[in-house]
Every structure is written in C-alpha cells, then in structure tokens.
Amino acid sequence: MPGSIGCPLAHLGPRFCGKIVEPVNPYLPIFVMIALASVICIAMVSLSWLLGPKKSTAYKESPFECGVAPTGSAHERFPIKFYLTAMLFILFDIEVVFLWSWMTVFRGWVEKGTPSAMYSFWAVMVYMVLWFLGDFYVLRSGALEWEESKTLHPEKFGKAVDEEAPYVQPVSEDAA
C-alpha cells in the first residue's frame, strides 16, 4: 500500500506481519532435525576414531570398574534386591506417567460434561486401590530393605560359586 508505514516486525520474518507461510511437508522440520542429529553423531564418532590415540597397552585393555582395580571373581552371587528394586521403580514410574496423562484428559472431560468421566474416575480409583495394596505388600514383605541378614535365612547364603577361582592381578601402570 502506498503511503503506509509497513510492518514494524518485518525483519523477524513473514509470520510476524500476518503472512503465514505453510511448509510444503509438515514433517519436513522433523526429518531435517533427524538428519542433522545423525550427521552430528556420525561426525563426532568418526572424528574421535580418526584423531584419537591408537596405542593399545595392557593397562588400557584391562577391565575397568569405576577407577578401581577389579577384585574377586565375576561368578559371585549377586543379590536379587537390585533387580527387584529396579522392577518396582519401573512399575511405579510408569504408573505416574499414566496417571499424569489421565489427569490432563480427565480435566477436559469434566469441563465438557462427558459421561465417560465418571466411568474413568471409578476405573482409576479401582486401579489406585490395587496400587496401594501392591505398595503395602512391597513394604510389608521387606522388598526394599537392603540388608540381606534381615530378609534371608542364613542357610540361603550358601557358598559363592567358583570360590576357588583364581584371582587375576591387574597390570600396574609401571609395567605398561
């Protein structure tokens, strides 16, 4: 328009002046992001392989565990408590994810007056009662107690597998 001042936000792009330009493919930005992330990952791995040191020593090839030389045998008993705690964490974590998404949908159903809101509410209440029963069982059975002497009978400790296994002395830095 002749004589008009123009759009003061024109330097920010066409979206700020009332003209919205639709992309050709709405998934194009996602594909570009995936391609860019792939290129960056491949470049980082390739460059570290090309430019990194290649000298292999006995010290570098030895097993590493948090900066401490490994001791004992790899065939010793591993307490089931770690697995049980991990499974409980996964179950309760997933429960929170499902409840959070249900709460956001439920609020919209209540605002709209949808009849399925009451059914959904009571279904989740039944689920929560079962969840609390499961939580009570876990706490009552001592599944989260770490001290094995309280939860295992002495005869269940038994003898570690391969107790006679030879100990492999780690290579010192001086020998490398």
Image (cartoon, rainbow, N blue to C red):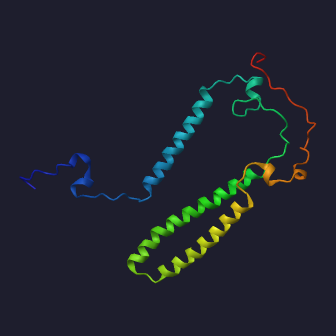
Foreground of the two, 157 or 34? 157
| Above or below: residue 164 compared with residue 4 | above
Farthest residue, direction top: 174
Q: How many labels does the image show?
A: 0
Residue 12 relative to residue 24: left or right: left
Farthest residue, direction front: 150
Residue 34 pos. (x, y %) = 50, 49
Query: Could you tell me which residue is drawn at 68 percent across and 24 percent down?
Result: 54
Farthest residue, direction left: 3
Query: Could you tell me which residue is drawn at 76 percent across and 48 percent down?
Result: 147
Query: Could you tell me which residue is drawn at 73 percent across and 53 percent down?
Result: 83
| Above or below: residue 1 compared with residue 111 | above
Query: Could you tell me which residue is drawn at 64 percent across and 72 percent down?
Result: 130
| Above or below: residue 51 compared with residue 134 | above
Residue 143 relative to residue 48: left or right: right
Residue 165 relative to residue 46: left or right: right
Farthest residue, direction right: 164
Foreground of the two, 169 or 2? 169
Q: For residue 108, what is the image quadrant?
A: bottom left
| Above or below: residue 125 compared with residue 24 | below
Residue 71 pos. (x, y %) = 81, 32
Location of the N terminus by quadrant is bottom left
Q: For residue 84, what is the image quadrant?
A: bottom right
Residue 106 pos. (x, y %) = 46, 73
Foreground of the two, 102 or 82? 82
Location of the C terminus by quadrant is top right
Residue 36 pos. (x, y %) = 48, 44
